[in-house]
Image (cartoon, rainbow, N blue to C red):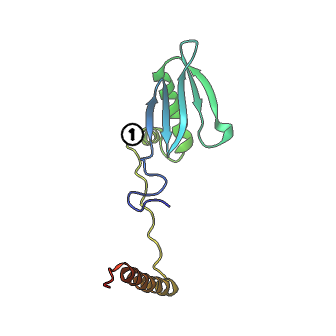
């Protein structure tokens, strides 16, 4: 179904992390999720939507500047996502811009005895069918 060369699974792009600008919007990514969104407001400021782990932790507030919004969002999210770390370390870990590389798929189990026997029978049948096709395609002398 999928070509065997080049197919590496569903998630082949690196997972975003840290602050990313998408057109006029600034987004804070954590663990492949968008946790903060800063969008321009009609009044000249910014509308900040904070969405961390649970529905009741979602907040939507208005901020005056991008700097203020980023600073508030970093601290608010860091306190909820890394409660076991000091705030400064949590903010550093949250705003890290290095993309997370997708993990390699786990190795498969070794084939069972039945699977090996089936593969052997299939290889023998394929060889026999190929030889019959070759014989049929050979030119015949009158």
The part of the image, by quadrant, that contains residue 131 is bottom left
In the image, taking residue 64 as reference, residue 21 lies left or right, namely left
* Spot occupied by residue 61 in the image (x, y as percentages of width and height): 61, 24
Residue that appears at 52% across and 45% down:
82
- Within 10 Å of disc 1 (Cα), the crowding (few <14, some 14-19, many 20+) is some
Which image quarter is the C terminus in? bottom left
In the image, taking residue 76 as reference, residue 19 lies left or right, namely left
- Disc 1 is placed on an element classified as loop
Q: Which residue is at the front of the view, 2 or 63?
A: 2
* Spot occupied by residue 112 in the image (x, y as percentages of width and height): 50, 83
Numbered circles on residues, count: 1
Examine the rendered structure and indicate whether residue 78 appears above or below residue 104.
Answer: above
Examine the rendered structure and indicate whether residue 5 appears above or below residue 16.
Answer: below
Outermost residue toward the right in this view: 56
Outermost residue toward the top in this view: 43
Residue that appears at 41% across and 47% down:
14
Q: Which residue is at the front of the view, 104 or 142?
A: 142
Q: Which residue is mark 1?
A: 97
* Spot occupied by residue 69 in the image (x, y as percentages of width and height): 51, 25
Q: Which residue is at the front of the view, 9 or 35?
A: 9
Outermost residue toward the front in this view: 142
Q: Which residue is at the front of the view, 139 or 129?
A: 139
Examine the rendered structure and indicate whether residue 22 appears above or below residue 12.
Answer: above
* Spot occupied by residue 135 in the image (x, y as percentages of width and height): 37, 83
Residue that appears at 48% across and 28% down:
26
């Amino acid at each position: 179904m999928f070509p065997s060369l080049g197919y590496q699974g569903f998630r082949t792009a690196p997972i975003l992390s840290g602050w990313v600008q998408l057109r006029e919007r600034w987004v804070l990514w954590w663990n492949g999720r968008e946790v903060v969104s800063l969008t321009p407001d009609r009044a000249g400021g910014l509308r900040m939507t904070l969405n961390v782990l649970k529905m009741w932790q979602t907040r939507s507030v208005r901020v005056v500047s991008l700097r203020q919004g980023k600073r508030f969002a970093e601290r608010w999210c860091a306190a909820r996502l890394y409660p076991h770390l000091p705030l400064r370390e949590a903010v550093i870990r949250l705003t890290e811009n290095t993309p997370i590389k997708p993990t390699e798929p786990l190795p498969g189990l070794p084939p069972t005895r039945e699977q090996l026997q089936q593969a052997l029978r299939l290889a023998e049948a394929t060889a026999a069918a190929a030889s019959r096709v070759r014989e049929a395609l050979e030119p015949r002398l009158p």
